[in-house]
Amino acid sequence: MLGFTKFELGKSNNMSRLRDMPRQPRRRSYDQHCAAAHALDLVGDRWTLLVVRELLAGPRRYTDLHADLPGVSTDMLAGRLKDMEATGLVTRRRLPPPASASVYELTPRGRDLLPVLRALADWGAPDLAEPRPTDAVRAHWFAVPLLGPLTELGPGVVQVTLDEGEFHVRIGADGGVAYGDGAADAPDVRLRTDAATCRALAAGERTLAEALESGRAEVRRTGAAAEPAATGAG
């Protein structure tokens, strides 16, 4: 005869039912009727704004997001993406054939976070020293802090090449900006520089014109509007 009491059997059955119940999402809120607190309820969790940074460069597959967010676990990233879908910041769609993958992309509400990231980058840039041995580096991470300095080049598509990789920035005639990872299809301007110069430009320690004059950056305009005189000395 098995030695289970009636109480133990009831407790075991209750635990089994609890395990079978769907897990409810953990509610995260400051419970404050304040615009700043509400915004932090939505984007204040660890990794959320960095997911936005990646998706501002364009739609990304989950594997690409994970590769460019070193340090995030797969469970954490999946959870953040689900939260961001639930709050209307991100959508997921299936790529048409022959592709067999889904991509995540920002909604208009999510893209509205670009000024927030620009403000954070402007605030943090003066403290960004040389990378530590443990720091990951991606070229397109410099895009947000350089959106302001690159407008000196005027409207068009600027392709930026660093030793770490490439990214491109689209500058509108109205001053609007957007950026993408990798090379542009047909850039109007090609800019080559290094990470140290990017940090100096982002921190306001030098202007793009000064970087060109010193040879720390080189600019080459392409197409009919090419201007050889705009190329730096180095």
Image (tube, grey):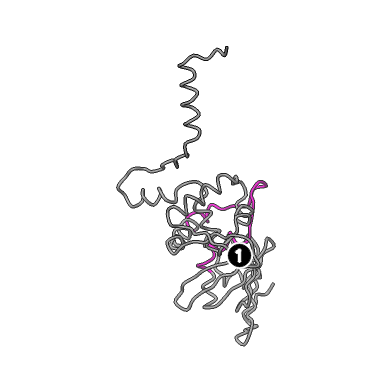
Residue 44 in the figure: left or right of residue 157: left
As displayed, is residue 124 above or below residue 158?
above
Residue 134 in the figure: left or right of residue 56: right
Q: Secondary structure at mark 1?
A: strand
The residue pinned by badge 1 equals 181
As displayed, is residue 19 above or below residue 53?
above
Q: Nearer the viewer, residue 208 or 165?
A: 165
- Image point (52%, 67%), residue name: 147
**Residue 138 on the magenta segment:** yes
Magenta stretch: dominant SS?
Answer: helix
**Residue 93 on the magenta segment:** no
Residue 183 position, x and y percent, is 64, 70
Q: Quadrant of the N terminus?
A: top right
Give, as a three-letter code, the residue at label 1: Asp
Q: Nearer the viewer, residue 150 or 20?
A: 20
Residue 95 position, x and y percent, is 59, 65
Quarter occupied by residue 163: bottom right
Q: Quadrant of the C terminus?
A: bottom right
